Image: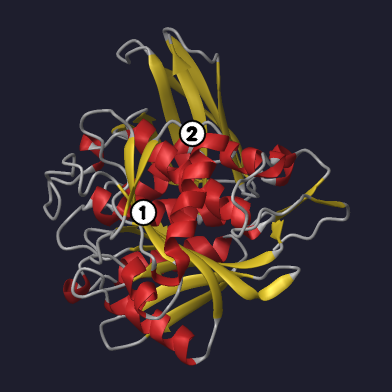
Amino acid sequence: MKKFCVFLALISLSLVTTAQEYNVAVDSIISQVKLDSLILNLRALSGEDTVMVNGEPKLIEHRVSNWGNDLAADYIKERLDNYGLEVTDQVYTTSGRNIFALQEGLVYPEQYYIICAHYDAVDFYCADDNGSGSAAVLETARIFSEMEFEYSIIYALWDEEEIGLIGSEYFASQADITDEDILSVINMDMIAWDGDDDMAVEIHSSFTASSNVLSDYIVEVNNLYGLGLTPSIEIPGTSASDHSRFWNHGYKAVLLIEEYYGGDFNPYYHSEQDRIEILNMPYFHEMAKLAIGSLASMASPIISTTNTNSLMAENTGCTITNYPNPANEFTKIIYSLQKGSNVTISLINDQGNKIKDLISAFENSGTHELNLSANDLKAGMYLLVMQCGSDIVTHKMMVR
């Protein structure tokens, strides 16, 4: 966790208030939520791209717990480790394995906010259920790990949700036994399907532990920061996801989900047709912003007076850019490495679909170039995704 020399403590927003006030720090954090970063982790978790895990290129073919989903758990653990967080690999049975990370608060270190999702699945791919929620948890950790907060934050990825909410029940029961002060839990489960483009989000809530206050708070975040979603609060909400295990132990919790009750639920749910190509990326982006903005507002950021963007820049051993950008007939891709490593560069469109791999080879340290013809590419935005060793960077490329 990075420490900054000069801090500006911004006014914290309490859940006991009836109305929030605009917070520039929260707005800045919301602006840091990157669709390309979300896509990167979603593609990795849903088995679309080979990624480096345990120092070797691996394809996460599935996340089904009773088939063995340790590779997905290892990937999640490495991503959280790379953000400098205190990671716990919670093996609670021979088949169950939660991965969570703690970021300690500066003012109230023993009071916790949790953002979570289940990473297990029932079939191959399963991008929406629940690669989408898992990717959003990792995106939260990427952004927040470069900052300080008044309250402690737990980034949690649960196992065995699909066979009975087992991982979250284990964690919640242990927290109950040790009387942990968990202030609120935001659970994300299936946040990337919007078949009718109405941007509707359901917030499943309860009167248990005043969870209804939390759901109202999240609606205020959506309105205050001009997010493009149309929220509805469902009370009583479904108990068919991990948030309900926290209800059972008296903790405030909600579920963010696409239209589970409202009739626009992913028809490819629980099948290998649940792939990134069928999902709605602008909707996915806004859903992640809502969860992350809500958590940021509650956990009370303490930010440096230095430019927020520079503070949040990823510290990686590789860089990538292209020129000219926007590209017309061709563009030159320029990439550099601090040390020799295996390098993969992929071209991905704005819907998260891979167009092609541009290179996959070992490269020595230094600056390298390759030419890309843009003649066969449609006009629009593309992502150049570069992995060198355990580092991953992205760069936006426009084609006109």
> Which residue lies at the image location 31% right of the left edge and 53% below the top edge?
131
Residue 300, disc:
none
> Which residue lies at the image location 43% right of the left edge and 37% below the top edge?
286
Q: Secondary structure at mark 2?
A: loop
Residue 227, disc:
2
Quarter of the image with the C terminus is top left
Q: Secondary structure at mark 1?
A: helix
Could you say which quadrant of the image residue 280 lies in?
Answer: top left
Q: Position of residue 256 (x, y in %)?
A: 36, 52
> Mark 2 and mark 1 in contact (Cβ < 8 Å)?
no
Q: Is residue 176 above or below residue 11?
A: below
Residue 133, disc:
1
Could you say which quadrant of the image residue 124 lies in?
Answer: bottom left
In the image, 326: left or right of 75? right
Which of 43 and 330 lies nearest the eye of the viewer?
43
Q: Position of residue 272 (x, y in %)?
A: 12, 51
